[in-house]
Image (spheres, rainbow, N blue to C red):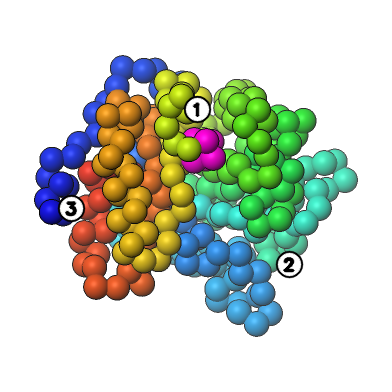
Amino acid sequence: MWLLMLVFVSVLSGSSFALDNGLMRTPPMGWLAWERFRCDIDCAHDPKNCISENLFMDMADRLSEDGWRELGYVYVNIDDCWSSKQRDDQGRLQADPKRFPGGIHKLARYMHDRGLKLGIYGDMGTHTCGGYPGTTLDKIQLDAQTFADWEVDMFKFDGCYSNASVQEEGYPLMSKALNATGRPIGYSCSWPAYQGGLPPKVNYTQLGQICNLWRNYGDIQDSWSSVLNIADWFFENQDVLGPAAGPGRWNDPDMVCLTGVQFVPDSIIFKLPCVLSEHF
């Protein structure tokens, strides 16, 4: 019965205005590290799976050489645990020097040389979810400019170690700060996921004006029950979520997991994002 619902569910484009940066008129597609590689930083003992520039260069090569780029999969996105545990002497975020010896700017150039785009992760709080330096309110403009200087193309802003009032102020401020850099940077907000995903705590009209996409619900896990749980929540709340989506502003049910979800054809996993106008 649940599978039959896929035929009837659609995502409507509402009339609210989208973030005025001209980006992501269709849902962005690419590769994201988190579900498979998490916060593995042990490059000495696990060099092929640790969060490092080599991992992201390898994924860039796969997208560009194996035909994925031509299908529209152009983003290679770093998630948590990429940075040093300390900011630099000027207060800027910096990549871990052992795992990213070339720095993020060089990695972005590697992507661009292959017709790809680089995404990066930050957190609207004192620390990221993995315990790395977060972006407090006083660091928003500095961090936005740092990402622009590195020629980053997409920014995911998580919400660990913050509260509702800080998020209410910080997510719109980051949107303005990114636009003020003059560099086109797609903006992914985790704000609604930390506020229950639904009105009245979540204002989807406002989200469409400040974010290109937003996480509504919990993290996906590598299991069919997790996929079902997320899909059920989206189907149950389509009257709210559907009108919020449209060119430049998308609901984000989290990434597509194609390995490890046992007994489920990959074709089904791929169809769900199409129904929900998802990315990745």
Q: Position of residue 127 (x, y in %)?
A: 72, 48
Query: Residue at the right extreme?
Result: 89
Q: Which residue is mark 2?
A: 98
The residue that appears at 55% across and 64% down in the rendered structure is: 38
- Position of 26 with respect to 130 (left or right) is left
What's the residue type where badge 1 is placed? Lys
Circle 3: element type: loop
Residue 231 position (above or below residue 245): below
The disc label shown at residue 240, or none: none
Q: Nearer the viewer, mark 1 or mark 2?
A: 1
N-term-proximal mark, 1 vs 2:
2
Q: How many marks?
A: 3
Give the crowd class for mark 1: few <14, some 14-19, many >=20 residues within 10 Å.
few
The residue that appears at 73% across and 36% down in the rendered structure is: 136
**Residue 190 within the segment the image draws in magenta:** yes
Query: Residue at the bottom extreme?
Result: 45
Q: Which residue is mark 1?
A: 201
Circle 2: element type: loop
N-term-proximal mark, 2 vs 3:
3
- Position of 217 with respect to 159 (left or right) is left
